[in-house]
Amino acid sequence: MPVPEFIEDRDELRSLAPVAIAPITHHIFVCTGKSCSARDSAAVLAAFDRELKARGMLFGREAKGKNPNGSVVLTECASVGFCAIGVAVMIYPDGVWYAQVHADDVPEIVQEHILNGRIVEKLALMKIPHVGSGNQSLETRALKSDWDA
Ligand code: FES
């Protein structure tokens, strides 16, 4: 398999990957591993897709109903170890891992966590420490909650 050419030109990179210049604030991962899939992670993923599109927040191509200037990237991921307590949802850069998420919880997560910066405490199980970041606005937002992992 040929090795792709390494691209050094930043403008070329940005034109090839428009997400690099989008105003991204959050990346949401929904686990679609075997156990989470058995708990209908597809419905959770679809609910995030629907909710974020309805609010114009989901980054992506207009042709797919998304917003090229959207602020949220939504992706699925493989197992993260919450297999017995899925569906697992992780939100970065806040580093919050939610457990037992159902599709019905998604509007609250989007409204409270993404828009208001308040962790949905009933679903949050752990928080990856935010180390070495100069992003004070996110640090400040995370401190609004008295939830502590
Ligand atoms: S299958 Fe989702 S955490 Fe393991």
Image (tube, helix red, strand yellow):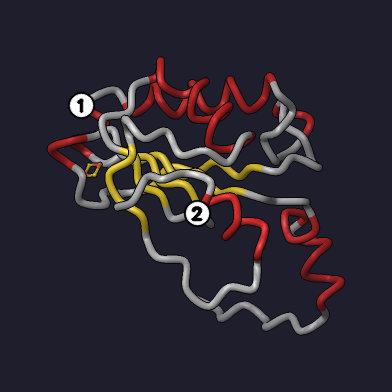
- Foreground residue, 117 or 58? 117
Rendered location of residue 45, percent (x, y): 45, 29
* Mark 1, other Cα within 10 Å: few <14 / some 14–19 / many ≥20: few
Relative to 25, is 118 on the left or the right? left
- Foreground residue, 80 or 93? 93
Query: Which residue in the structure is indicated by mark 2?
Result: 94
- Residue at the spot 80% in from the left edge and 65% down from the top edge: 14
Q: Amino acid at mark 2?
A: Asp
> Quarter-wise, where is residue 18 in the image?
bottom right
Q: Quadrant of ligand 1?
A: top left
- Residue at the spot 64% in from the left edge and 42% down from the top edge: 72
Rendered location of residue 21, percent (x, y): 80, 58
Rendered location of residue 20, percent (x, y): 74, 61
- Foreground residue, 63 or 113? 113
- Residue at the spot 76% in from the left edge and 84% down from the top edge: 8
Query: Which residue in the structure is indicated by mark 1?
Result: 38
